[in-house]
Amino acid sequence: LCVACRLVLVDPVRLPCGDHEVCHACAASRATCPSCGVEVPTAELPRAAKTARLLAKMEVTCDFDRDGCAWTGPWSELALHRELHCAFQPLPCPYKGSGCPEVLERRAMPPHKAGCRYRSSQCEHCLKVVRDVDLPLHLDRCGQAPVSCQRCALPMPRASYERHLAEECAEGAVPCPLRFIGCEHVGKRKDTEAHLQESAPHHLRTLIGAVVEMREAHAREVSALRAELAAATARVERVDLTEVERLRATVEQQRVWLDRFASGRVVTVDPNGAGNFTTIGAALAACSADDAVLVRPGAYDGPVHVEKRGVVLRAAGDVSITSATGPALRLSGDGAAAEGFECLSTSPVSCAVVVEGARCALSDVVVAGAALHGIQIAAGGDATIARCSVKSCKQAAVEVRGTATIVDSQFSDSARPVLLVHGGIATATDCAFTGGQLNGAQVINGGRLEATRCRFAGNRFSNVDVVNASAELTDCDIFDSAKCGLCVAEEGRVDARACVISENALPNVAVLPSGVCSLERCTIERGRSHGVVVKRGGTCTIDAATVVRDNGDTAVAREGQQ
């Protein structure tokens, strides 16, 4: 027993007196030996290796033996037994994060979990994941629930109602389409064509003056872009190869914008009225496929929905989009792209950014918070995410149900898994997934993750968790989890190559029943529990890997195949 706390020694160290041993934590809080009064130095004390070995082999019973647990085994395996197996271990409900206060024994958890009112289910209209207790309120607000227009009685999803009133309703009052040239007429949308025919002579005279003014403005914009292009080209000769490649991409992008300006395919948005439009929604409604929308600095209201094929939305400075009724930014048109925006959704049932179209692109997008996911790649969606930053979301930072290619991006501090691959395919390169309240990356329901040179660190559950899915990890750093570094379970399969997996609180690598894991040229070290644990029914292949014996317990503990 520890002479300080009088409990079983945990990580024992020997005091300078040579006769007494205490827990490592007790030594750090004591100035003198509790028994003989010898001063305890502030330097690191020697580990009591012999005592530690005796404790590891000591046969003990479970802390819950009085409740009925019949387990006995070595002291070193007691913590793992309680963490993963003991049927009498009190556990919080898995839906605690959603508000469930219940704490039950592990054996009573399955029936409770199946009927917990705080569990999540999908809305039949929008397929969003909502707590059962919140489902009635969600249905009253669901954007996909059917409603009818109060003016024309046309049925539609609730999310389309405001847009219908603003852009489609035949009975709605709208200004003349040529108001930007000075026409002040306001009438019903269905009468617009008649007004245009009646006022054609007046409109033509006014339009000629407006066209002359716009051509002059375009000429000034083209001149400024040509000067920027020339300056960028000149700098290429003075930078290293990496900067050259970046500048080449910038030059190419500027050429595209220059071509669109010269052909009149770029519209500008300025909140002060100095552009073609004052709102992003109006600009998107007016543009055609493959057009570009240049948004000047300012704070804009969402939601912003890019529906048309190939439309590029670009921020020319500090631009923020905030929405209280849905995603701040939604890309549903194939080939749509958005660059340089800060997005925030305050809606309790919406993500900040949603991608539904194919071959879409997000670059330099910042999400600083969302009630659901920061970025959601919907089923059927396909997106490239580059140089983006997402943090402080109440669900996942990124949820992938479709296909996502993620490069050079940072994701952190989400209340659920930082990266959730839910049946989709995610390819990540040079990214960081850190500080999640659950997993750093969770791959489930047949999903696949391919990660290269990524960092998974500081998450409260496993840094990487693969369940009934697959993952390929190459040259990744996986460390400092409050639980396992890498956990493979329930038909999950992981191929890890040249990865460093270290300093995790539970086993650095845990292969649970029916999980399959391959460790090739990996380094498994400095774990605070076992280096690698293979449970009965699991399979782990270790090829040319280094499993260092400085893990807290054994380097490799196995019940399954290894």
Image: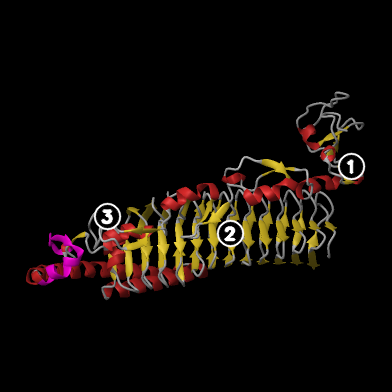
Amino acid carrying mark 3 in the image? Pro
Dot 1 or dot 3: first in sequence order is: 1
Structural distance between the alpha carbons of marks 3 and 2: 36 Å
Structural distance between the alpha carbons of marks 1 and 3: 71 Å
Q: Main secondary structure of the magenta part?
A: helix
Residue at which label 2 appears: 420
Q: Which callout, 3 or 2, points to the residue nearer the camera? A: 2
Amino acid carrying mark 1 in the image? Val
Instruction: Please tell me how crowded label 2 is: few (under 14), some (14-19), or many (20+) other residues with Cα within 10 Å.
Output: many
Q: Is residue 497 visible?
A: no
Q: Which callout, 1 or 3, points to the residue nearer the camera? A: 1
Residue at which label 1 appears: 60
| Observer-nearest of 430 and 120 | 120
Q: Secondary structure at mark 2?
A: strand
| Observer-nearest of 266 and 198 | 198
* x, y percent for residue 230: 34, 71
Dot 3 or dot 2: first in sequence order is: 3
Q: Where does the C terminus fall, quadrant-wise?
A: bottom right
Instruction: State left or right for residue 550 relative to residue 103.
Output: right
* x, y percent for residue 532: 79, 57
Structural distance between the alpha carbons of marks 2 and 1: 39 Å
Residue at which label 3 appears: 271
Q: Where does the N terminus fall, quadrant-wise?
A: top right
Give the residues in magenta: 180-197
